Every structure is written in C-alpha cells, then in structure tokens.
Image (cartoon, rainbow, N blue to C red):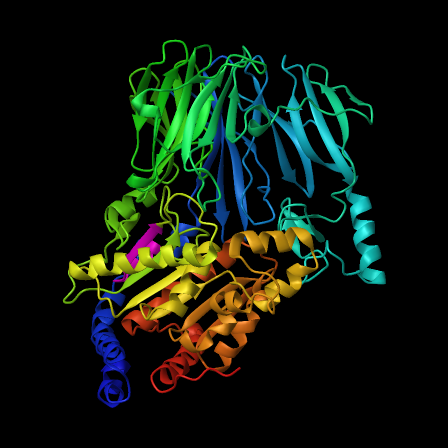
Amino acid sequence: MTPKPLVRVNALISAIGRLRALRVIAFAIAGFLALTIAAHANSVSPRALVEVADIGNPVVSPDGKLVAFRVEQASIERNTYDSLWYVQDTGGRFPPRRIADGGIPLRDSAGISLPAAAFWSPDSKWIYFRALMAGRVAVWRAAADGSRAEPVTQNAADVRDMSVSADGEMLRVSFGATREEVRRAEKAEYDRGIRIDARIPIGQSLFRSGYIGGKPETQRYGPIWFDRVPLLASVPSRWEAIELNTGQAHDLATSYAPPRTPTADEILPDASALAIDDKGRIALLRRVGQAAGMLQKPGIELVMLPEKAASRLIRCQAILCTGQNISGIQWRPGSDEVLFTVTDPNEGLAQSIYRWNVRSGNVEPVVRSRGLINGGRDRASHCGSSSDVLICVTSAAEQPPRLERVDLTTGERQVLFDPNAALAQEIKGSVSAELLRWSDAKGQIFTGQFIPARGALASPPPLFITYYNCPGFLRGGVGDEWPLASLAESGISALCINNPPGYILDGVARYNQALSGVESAIDLLASEGRIDRTRVGMGGLSFGSEVTLWTEMKSDLLAAASVTSPGITSNYYLFGSLKGKVFFDGLKKDWQLGAPRSTSKRWKALAEENNLASMQAPILMQMPEQEYIMALNYAIPLIRAHKADLYVFPNEPHQKFQPRHKLAAYERNLDWFRFWLQGYEDSSPEKAGQYKIWERMRTVRYCCRTVPR
C-alpha cells in the first residue's frame, strides 16, 4: 500500500515555503523507510527502559567485609516499585544475599526517589533503615546473614528522621503528627472547605492529591520555592531513643535537638560540601573566582581544616585537583586521604575518583569511568568505602547500572552485581552511543551523547534532541520521558545535550545559550550527513521543557516538539503571586520579571502565550496534574488551532514516577516522533484515536498559520 504522506506531496508543495517543502518531501520518503523499520520489533523497548533496576547508596560495614545496598525496580502490572535490600561481601567471592524488603520507595515532592540511607550496627551484623510498609513509615532492621528482618519502631506516627549514636548503641528517631491526626485534619478541611492562602498549591486537586513520602497526602507549600510538604508538617518533631541491644525505647525531652553538623558554608564562606573524619578533620569544597552574572562562582577548590576552629587552610594544589569540576568528597577510612570525585563537563559528565593525601599533598588517580561511578543516579552521591576498596554504582550511556568493587591502591575493577545484565546485552547488540563535543559560534563548548539511528539507511535519518544533562545510563533524558534507545532502533537518531557548567542569571541569555547549543549540534550533524536537518524533533522536562519551548518560539529548527513542564505564563505568575516575597524574589532573580504590566517587554520576550504566532511545530504536552494548569495560557490556543495535543497524568508531581504513567509517556512520545519525523503510524486499533487527532493537526500544519487567542 502506498504510504499516505506520498499521496499528499504534490498538492502540498505549492502551498508551503521552501523549507517546509523540503520537510514534506523528506517526510514522504521517510514513510517508505518507516514501513521497513516498523517490521523490526524493538529489542530495547520503552517498557525495558521503565523497568531498569536502580542500585542505591552502598554502605560498607564497620569491619569492611560487607556492603549493603538497595535495588529499586518498577512493576508495570502493579503500578508500583519493588525495593529490596541486599548484602554482599566486598571481596566479591559470593553473590549478593537478599535480606529484606525495602518497602515503597520514599520520594520528595518533585517525584524523585530519596536516597536509601542505611546504618550498620557496630558488630556488622545488622543494618537499620527507614521504610514505608503497610501504610506506615518505620525503622526496620535486617540481619546481614538474611535470617531475620523486623520493625524497630511501631509508632502511631511516621518516622521523620533517624540517626545512630557515635558508639552505635543508640538509635534516635523523630516523629511528627500521628497518622490519625493527619486523617482527622484532612477530613475536617474536606468537610468545611479549604481556605486558600499562601500555603495552598493552587491549580491541582486539594485533597490527598500528591504522593509525599510514598502515599497520598493533602499538600501544602514548603519553605523552598514550590516544594510541597504534608498537611501537618509544621507539627514539631518529638524524639525517641531506642537502645539497640535491648530494644527498649524512651521519650526524649521536648527540648531535645539532635546533634547538628554545621553546613559547609557555616564553616567556610562559599563552601558547598564537607566531609568530617573520625579525627575531626574537615574537608571542604568551596567556590572561587568571579561570578560575573552567574549564580555561583565558576571555580571549585578542595581544602582541609585540621579542626573546626583552625584558622589555617590546607589547599590541594596538585594539578589533578586544580581547575577541576570536583563534585564529591569523602574520607578514606583510617587514613590521611580525601577521596574526591571529578565530574568532567568536557567529557560528557564522565566521573573519575582521586585520592589526596592531606599530609604529603600528593594526589593519585584511583579510577576513571565513561559515565557515573558513585552511589547511584545522583551525581553527588558517594561510593561505599573501606580502607581498601570502594563499592560503587557504575553506569554509562549504553550501560545500565551495576555494582562494582574498586581497589583503592591499584584501581582494579570487579563487577559484584549486575541486575540489568540482560538489558545490557540487548543494548550492546542493537544501539551504541558516542560522546560528541562541539562549539557554537561564540566558542562555547557543548557535549552530548549521540545514539545513531540503527541500520544502513538510504538517506540521512531524522534527529530527536533532549536538553538538560545526560549523566550515566541514557533512558529518556532528565525525567525519563523520551525512550532514546527505542527511537534509535526505530530509525530516529537521538542526541542528549548537556547544559554547559554554570547557571546564567539572565533568563534570555540562559535560553539563548541553550538554543545556540541545539542549533550548532544540528549544523554539525547535518554537515557530516548524519541527520536530516528538515526532520528534527525535541523534548525536555523542567529546564529542558523551557529550552524546547524557546527553540520552538525563536527558531525554525523543529518539525515536532514534546514537553512535560510548563513555561513562564501569566497563570504561573497569578498562582505563584499568593506566595508573596519568596516568589517575587525568585522571579526577579531567575527571569528578571516583575508584574506583567511593569515589565511588559520582558514578559513579551519570555512568555509562550505572547509568542503563539511563532510556535509552528506541533507540540505534544504530557504534563503532571500538579502543573498543567500553568500551561493553559498557551496550550488552549494551540489546541484550538490544532497545533498541540495535551495529556494530563493524575496525582503526578513535577517528575512523573508511576510506572504505568512513565510507560504511557514513553510510548506516546515514540509514536509522536515516528509520526511527525517518519510518517509512520502504529497499526494497533487502540491507537487509532490519537492518529486521527494527529492527522487533523498535520492537515492544519500545512495549510494554516493562524493561532486563535
């Protein structure tokens, strides 16, 4: 059967400009290629990317012989996550032993899984951890030999925080309001009506609409920007002490406050990270240089204080630690060495670990990687450490997470646990990633991970771009929304671009820098014949969404776009204005915006609703329920003009996390870009409705340019 795009080509060419004509011709040719590619089933499916097993926060036992770590994996069928605690010997002589269920992963209000903190008992026989099970957040303990796992706390309130005393004999636990008190407060509000004030997250359901701490909660704004907290989060914490040898618990005085480690900048101005060893020595990272329009000073210096009150700094002056993007520090147990991690922006955020001897000043490399080598997905997380070895989670663009042992003296690496081995093998046989490095017209260096379209194609393939940062294993860019490997297997090359280091305070300059990176990447790949510049799609979350929308407004680079976060709109201003000074100060600092009337020129430049006529590429919007209403200023006019398609996911925060929602977003994005960049339509009957909508959008795209207001 002749593909639909080819039937329309002759009739359309006379009605559109030269660039649009080229896009349509390429689109028609792509229709033939897509039919061939479609016959090959993806081995790296969107589902496989959702179900990647993540390893988090390895912690080495006091005797150095064992490491505990948690594995977290999505279950599509149950729309939840399984988390399991394992213990393995650090020598790698035996496979890991499953010792406990980790419960439903706790998350922050943006939807990101919280680090799985675990504490070892002094005798290395038990681990203690916080977990949500059966609707309760409690402290659990699990025997390292796998013989027993049991709750340590059984309280009417959820555990907020926990810490272990220096001697390891006492567990201190904090609690807030009881679960029954929270339920009563929620019900009272529900019955009497909820008063709207500066604490209320406007624009979403107000009753148990967010998953804070892993379960539905009625939310309020926290003290930081648009962070959300549970309804009774302001109830003061009360503390309880538990003797670990006997299990006996007693309440601590209401005036009790846990021992507090000073923050880095309290010890040293401009310091951003610290690590304290058992002798009280303090290693710090501090910012140096001139900010000059940036949020932070550009340089990072590694220093050490012999003690908190010391007046003399010891600086790491070796060439391996100067001028480097040092992202993490920790002490090597029982030594004079600070282990520091460099995340190199010129190498696509690849990480290396070094050791600095604070007495001799010598710096020696420990290990280099092509991606992340740390404690999990967070670039700033630490490997587990003993005096002899590091236990790290490693990943690279085409390598899913696995656990490795690194010898601190020789740098020798050994894989301890690889729960994603089957996926890694599938990826190895189907897609490959390469690090790109290029400069724009101003000499700004950019890096990105490029996954070429699979197979020998008769003409240059389309390109999909996502923008923000691309550390470790490439799934779907920041937020995991665009299945990069699946796109490449389907004949669409994929490029994940890293934003250059440093946060530019000027909003227009910040977006223009990103646009320049996108444009120069397209120029590079097109000049080498590696992509078809008339068939480029783009997507991103948060800042990535903002850059995608800016590229849509300020250029003709895109044939299709996909976003999941709103941009700057009058709705955003209206809803945020109730928060008062903290919102207005942030708006002024990050975007140089005041009230729309008083800064109308700036609003005209930045707000999507004021740039509708320039938004010509079709946009797929797959947004969380907590945020979509802020995008309606431009989304509704674009939908009415058949230039956008909007889907909203219930009970989702800034970053979607429910497995079924993530899979739906992956699959729809794959369908969307195959439709617009290849002319391909999946024959599944359940997708007929979406293609009917998109067909209408395509008809309008090539006949009309008006956007209703």
| Displayed quadrant of residue 696 | bottom left
Q: Is residue 164 left or right of residue 8?
A: right
Instruction: Looking at the picture, tell me which residue is in the foreground, 290 or 484.
Output: 290
Instruction: Looking at the picture, tell me which residue is in the foreground, 64 or 301.
Output: 301
Instruction: Give the image location of residue 319, x and y in percent.
Output: 30, 23
Instruction: Give the image location of residue 349, x and y in percent.
Output: 35, 40
Q: Look at the image and give the residue range highlighted in magenta.
A: 484-497
Instruction: Give the image location of residue 161, x and y in percent.
Output: 67, 32
Instruction: Looking at the picture, tell me which residue is in the foreground, 518 or 596.
Output: 596
Q: Does the magenta segment cover residue 492?
A: yes
| Displayed quadrant of residue 192 | bottom right
Instruction: Give the image location of residue 541, x and y in percent.
Output: 46, 56
Instruction: Work out whether 482 lies above or below 73.
Output: below
Instruction: Work out whether 591 lies above or below 370.
Output: below
The residue lying at 76 percent from left, 61 percent from top is 196
Q: Quadrant of the N terminus?
A: bottom left
Instruction: Looking at the picture, tell me which residue is in the foreground, 597 or 230.
Output: 597
The residue lying at 69 percent from left, 35 percent from top is 160
